[in-house]
């Protein structure tokens, strides 16, 4: 799907703002002598922007609008390196609310619904984004935030919540608790708006069946407003995204060239009207495809397929971003542990489990070392892995690259 002339005009407005502000991307463009693009081919010659660029702009190097126009900042939920700080103008916040309210409408949610928000509030965009869209829609918001399952279930019953907003992991946990406590007949949920992590069809079926609700995938990332830039409709033929606010390309992650509609590749997003921190050709590292044709719902907005994974090595476990380098850094702090380790991620009894296998020599107490590693990993990433200490030489060796991470959840 080539960029339209109307979208090109909007891109040129963002190019002008970026160059004038002298942001990292504006400097790239100025050095290349680029002040506008006049065709899809010229647009595809524009340089990409990457998360590393955004980190290097810390703290406010992305700010493109005048400071007196900035009303809010958010930060990415990444767990390594400097955070990415995204400034928002009042118009950015309003645009985000419009997009998010549109998501709710596509899910068949109305002002008569009671929207139960469980994602986190604060610098992360999730909780406040779900609330923003619900308020724009005119629905009642129950801004619970994460955790405290007892209180979540009490409020869900007493306030008769009809829409659950959460990660798939927490939706599953809540569904299991509802079944365990035998309170299904006191729960009034009709729909679930689920985001932030990949989830299997089996998990989806389990949540939908247990709670008796319709489930909707919502898409977004902090760098591009936050959640709410796309959602599937009741026909469930992919996620509609808002091409009046965004232009999405799918590129081959190796050649970096756009691929035809229908082919899998990496999602690259350009913000068309964002003021506080516009991004051009931002590589998300999410893998999906643009679905050709028109949805049975008749919407003019194009569709993305389900997010199939990422081009980088991030693991999402229990709703937390985990990188192998984090685990490796922790293991390196234990002199008793060798350089060899393996991470296995499974889905057991309805929950994600991370097992870490670590080699050591026979002179240490294996159980004591395992407990200490587990405690340090929990301190760093927020949950406790299962750690198995084995003798040197037990883990497989390779003449090529050693496969450190084995994700069994999607086998």
Image (spheres, helix red, strand yellow):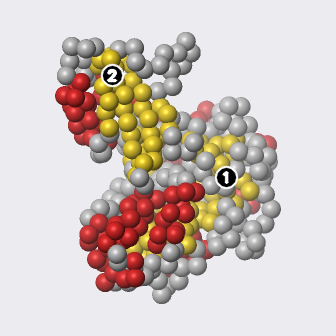
Q: Measuring from the top left, give residue 133's x and y in whole percent.
A: 48, 72
Extreme bottom residue here?
112
**Of callouts 2 and 1, the N-terminal one:** 1
Of residues 6 and 132, the one nearer the viewer is 132
Q: Residues within 10 Å of mark 1 (few under 14, many from 20)?
A: many
Label 2 secondary element: strand
Q: Measuring from the top left, give residue 91's x and y in whole percent.
A: 50, 67
Q: Residues within 10 Å of mark 2 (few under 14, many from 20)?
A: some
Of residues 193 and 84, the one nearer the viewer is 193
Q: Measuring from the top left, give residue 46's x and y in whole percent.
A: 68, 40
| Residue at 73% across, 37% down | 257
- Residue behind mark 2: 390
- Residue behind mark 1: 248
Where 254 falls versus 68 (above or below)?
Answer: above
Q: Measuring from the top left, give residue 270's x and y in whole percent.
A: 62, 51
| Residue at 52% across, 54% down | 199
Asked if residue 378 shows in the view, the reply is yes
The dot on residue 377 is none
- The number of callouts visible is 2
Of residues 304 and 385, the one nearer the viewer is 385
- Spatial CA span between label 2 and label 1: 47 Å
| Residue at 36% across, 71% down | 178
Q: Is residue 384 left or right of residue 227?
A: left
Q: Is residue 41 left or right of residue 206?
A: right
Where 118 falls versus 355 (above or below)?
Answer: below
| Quadrant (top left/top right/bottom left/bottom right) for the C terminus | top right
| Residue at 25% across, 17% down | 336
Where 399 falls versus 411 (above or below)?
Answer: above
């Amino acid at each position: 799907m080539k960029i339209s002339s109307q979208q090109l005009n909007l891109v040129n407005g963002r190019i002008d703002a970026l160059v004038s502000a002298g942001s990292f991307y504006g400097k790239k463009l100025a050095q290349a002598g680029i002040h506008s693009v006049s065709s899809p081919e010229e647009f595809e010659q524009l340089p990409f922007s990457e998360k590393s660029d955004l980190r290097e702009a810390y703290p406010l190097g992305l700010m493109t609008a005048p400071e007196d126009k900035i009303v809010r900042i958010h930060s990415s939920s990444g767990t390594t390196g400097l955070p990415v700080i995204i400034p928002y103008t009042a118009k950015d916040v309003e645009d985000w609310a419009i997009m998010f309210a549109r998501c709710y409408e596509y899910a068949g949610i109305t002002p008569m619904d009671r929207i139960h928000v469980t994602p986190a509030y604060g610098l992360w965009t999730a909780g406040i984004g779900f609330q923003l869209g619900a308020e724009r829609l005119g629905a009642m918001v129950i801004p619970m935030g994460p955790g405290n399952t007892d209180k979540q279930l009490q409020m869900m019953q007493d306030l008769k919540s009809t829409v659950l907003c959460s990660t798939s992991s927490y939706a599953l946990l809540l569904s299991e608790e509802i079944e365990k406590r035998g309170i299904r007949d006191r729960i009034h949920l009709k729909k679930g708006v689920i985001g932030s992590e990949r989830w299997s069809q089996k998990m989806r079926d389990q949540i939908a069946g247990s709670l008796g609700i319709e489930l909707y995938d919502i898409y977004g990332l902090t760098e591009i407003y936050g959640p709410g830039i796309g959602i599937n409709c009741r026909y469930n033929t992919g996620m509609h995204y808002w091409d009046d606010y965004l232009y999405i390309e799918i590129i081959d992650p190796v050649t970096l060239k756009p691929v035809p509609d229908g082919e899998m590749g990496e999602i690259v997003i350009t913000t068309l009207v964002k003021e506080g921190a516009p991004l051009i050709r931002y590589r998300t590292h999410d893998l999906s495809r643009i679905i050709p044709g028109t949805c049975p719902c008749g919407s003019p907005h194009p569709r993305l397929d389900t997010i199939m994974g990422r081009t980088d090595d991030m693991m999402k476990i229990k709703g937390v971003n985990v990188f192998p380098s984090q685990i490796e850094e922790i293991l390196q702090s234990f002199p008793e542990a060798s350089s060899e380790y393996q991470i296995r991620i499974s889905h057991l009894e309805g929950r994600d489990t991370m097992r870490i296998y670590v080699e050591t020599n026979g002179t240490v107490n294996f159980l004591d070392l395992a407990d200490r590693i587990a405690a340090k990993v929990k301190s760093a990433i927020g949950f406790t892995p299962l750690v198995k200490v084995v003798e040197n030489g037990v883990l497989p060796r390779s003449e090529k690259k050693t496969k450190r991470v084995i994700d069994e959840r999607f086998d």
